[in-house]
Image: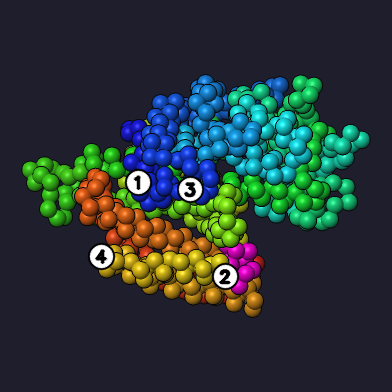
């Protein structure tokens, strides 16, 4: 079994050479970023994760969490000590607001730590991983009094948080929720109802947990327009008394056993309104969008971890004789690496991982710009791009992350199916990312309906034109990636046009093509990153700078992506244009008949 090794060299290359974070001055907090800081984050965060968190991965899967008779929950062995070390090291405060005790650094730097933690032990990351979104939600919606009371503890990691949305009958369709909130004389609300699938619903890592709960006030409008958001602590800070929140049970899950996924019962629990009544969904979307981007990072992390294991195994395991030139003809068998089909799986993984990592980090920079740029137009443009790419990063990233984990398991053959090598755990852990924080089909609908059709395709077309412009401007030596990407962009433009037309003529057709459109945008976006990565790698190689082998590998992987992935855009465009006709052709009786 191979241990996880944080990809610090690739991270540094993206942050320093591709994104040039150390040369930026807008937003203002980028002034604190220099080459030393980038190196420190890339390497020291990696050391923390490999030494403190990675050893928990196997035990977290085997032990899981335990609910006791008194309703309390304990996490696997080592989680409490690791979380204390996390807080003491200050990693969680890195990109948190300075006014409440954070370090105020760019979100792009924290994205590195998110990936490392998820690769090291995804179950552990489920606890602190939600805090950026939770803090942002409270900052944007709470009264000044609530901010002062809760945010310093949340930023410091002394209190963790949850996002309590889902009910047994109301998952994606939050408008069906029944949890009730009744206003009290002191201005607080009594919250009653049951929430399910609540990650970190209870645990022993912190003394208090801040539940952000969606509920309905009396006479609220039907549907999603009648949802309000409330802050409901596990322990009431003023009195130290336990609030009316209890754990009904812990879900028994396929994976992520180290994460306490709870059924939470609210029995007239005391809570405080965040924002205005009946406007809770908008406030909660701050947290949900942050979570969706984080899920894309989870897909990246699962892919990276599984790739490292598979590549090491394929170099050691000898099976069969190569059909071409053999490393050592005297041997009875060759390493798996000599077989083209094994290389196909490994190169598919590598091309996704390195291109998608660049896309995630580029998007993280846009998040920083959208919040902190001094120029209003720049903020607006960055926000539009982040909004457009959020469902793509969540859905495409988690789809490909799971697909990569499965393919890397395939490299192991039968050994990948047994627990000894750890591959089946990665597959099980990765599977949920395609479901939670909005199932990937819903993300595709969001991209097609809200992010493309709603504005007549303006942002989508601007995004594609930006990529097309870079293809046209590329040096002739980059034709191997620029030319096929430039041709594939036309498929994206045509698909976006089709989505807009379908939305106007038959929304079912738009819905039928939405998933393929999401895949098409994701494929193009990663291809765009490979164009940019190739440009930088070529410049450094030609100048004799950096590690020549590393740079040559970048260019070879870009060529592989151009040859093997970009051609898929043709088929995806046709799938978009096909709409929902054949999908909806069978009636219910025909679907059920066997």
Q: Earlier in the sequence, mark 1 or mark 3?
A: 1
* Picture residue at 23% right of the left edge, 38% below the top: 316
Residue 458's disc number: 2
C-alpha gap between disc 1 and disc 4? 21 Å
Q: Earlier in the sequence, mark 1 or mark 4?
A: 1
- Quarter placement of the N terminus: top left
Residue 477's disc number: 4
Tell me which corner region of the image, top left, top right, bottom left or bottom right, holds residue 136: top right
C-alpha gap between disc 3 and disc 4? 31 Å
Q: Earlier in the sequence, mark 2 or mark 4?
A: 2
Whether residue 265 is visible, yes or no, is: no
What x and y, as percent, mark residue 188? 84, 36
Is label 4 in a helix, a strand or a loop? helix
Bounds of the magenta span?
Answer: 447-458
Q: Nearer the viewer, mark 3 or mark 4?
A: 3
Residue 25's disc number: 3
* Picture residue at 8% right of the left edge, 46% below the top: 329
Whether residue 149 is visible, yes or no, is: yes
Judged by its main secondary structure, the magenta piece is: helix
Q: Earlier in the sequence, mark 2 or mark 3?
A: 3
């Amino acid at each position: 079994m191979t241990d996880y090794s944080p990809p610090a060299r690739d991270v540094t290359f993206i942050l320093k050479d591709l994104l040039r974070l150390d040369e930026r001055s807008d937003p203002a907090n980028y002034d604190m970023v220099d080459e030393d800081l980038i190196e420190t984050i890339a390497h020291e965060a990696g050391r923390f994760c490999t030494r403190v968190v990675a050893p928990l991965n196997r035990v977290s899967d085997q032990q899981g969490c335990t609910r006791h008779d008194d309703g309390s929950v304990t996490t696997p062995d080592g989680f409490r000590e690791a979380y204390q070390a996390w807080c003491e090291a200050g990693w969680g405060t890195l990109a948190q607001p300075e006014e409440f005790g954070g370090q105020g650094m760019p979100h792009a730097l924290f994205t590195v730590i998110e990936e490392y933690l998820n690769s090291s032990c995804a179950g552990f990351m489920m606890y602190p991983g939600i805090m950026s979104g939770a803090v942002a939600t409270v900052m944007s919606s709470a009264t000044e009094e609530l901010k002062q009371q809760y945010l310093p503890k949340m930023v410091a990691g002394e209190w963790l948080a949850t996002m309590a949305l889902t009910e047994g009958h109301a998952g994606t369709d939050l408008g069906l929720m029944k949890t009730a909130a009744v206003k009290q004389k002191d201005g607080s609300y009594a919250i009653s109802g049951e929430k399910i699938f609540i990650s970190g619903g209870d645990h022993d890592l912190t003394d208090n947990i801040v539940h952000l709960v969606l509920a309905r006030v009396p006479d609220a409008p039907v549907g999603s327009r009648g949802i309000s958001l409330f802050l409901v602590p596990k322990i009431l800070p003023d009195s130290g008394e336990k609030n009316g929140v209890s754990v009904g049970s812990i879900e028994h899950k396929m994976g992520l056993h180290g994460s306490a996924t709870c059924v939470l019962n609210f029995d007239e629990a005391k809570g405080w309104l965040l924002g205005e009544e009946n406007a809770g969904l908008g406030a909660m979307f701050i947290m949900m969008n942050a979570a969706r981007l984080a899920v894309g990072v989870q897909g990246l992390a699962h892919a990276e971890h599984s790739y490292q294991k598979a590549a090491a195994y394929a170099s050691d395991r000898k099976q069969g004789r190569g059909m071409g030139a053999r490393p050592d003809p005297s041997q009875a068998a060759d390493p798996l690496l000599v077989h083209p089909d094994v290389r196909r799986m490994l190169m598919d993984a590598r091309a996704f991982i390195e291109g998608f990592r660049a896309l995630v980090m580029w998007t993280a920079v846009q998040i920083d710009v959208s919040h902190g740029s001094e120029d209003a137009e720049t903020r607006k443009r960055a926000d539009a791009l982040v909004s457009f790419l959020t469902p793509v990063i969540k859905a495409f990233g988690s789809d490909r992350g799971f697909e990569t984990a499965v393919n890397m398991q395939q490299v192991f053959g039968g050994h990948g199916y047994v627990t000894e090598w750890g591959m089946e755990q990665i597959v099980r852990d990765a599977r949920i990312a395609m479901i939670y924080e909005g199932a990937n089909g819903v993300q595709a609908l969001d991209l097609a309906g809200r992010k493309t059709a709603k504005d007549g395709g303006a942002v989508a077309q601007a995004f594609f034109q930006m990529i097309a412009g870079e293809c046209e401007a590329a040096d002739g030596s980059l034709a191997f990636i620029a030319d096929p990407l430039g041709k594939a962009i036309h498929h994206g433009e045509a698909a976006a046009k089709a989505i807009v037309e379908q939305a106007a003529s038959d929304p079912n057709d738009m819905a039928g093509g939405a998933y393929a459109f999401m895949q098409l945008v994701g494929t193009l976006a990663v291809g765009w990153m490979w164009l940019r990565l190739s440009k930088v790698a070529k410049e450094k190689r030609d100048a004799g700078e950096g590690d020549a082998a590393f740079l040559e590998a970048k260019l070879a992987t870009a060529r592989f992506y151009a040859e093997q992935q970009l051609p898929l855009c043709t088929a995806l465009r046709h799938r978009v244009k096909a709409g929902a006709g054949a999908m909806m052709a069978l009636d219910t009786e025909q679907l059920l008949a066997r």
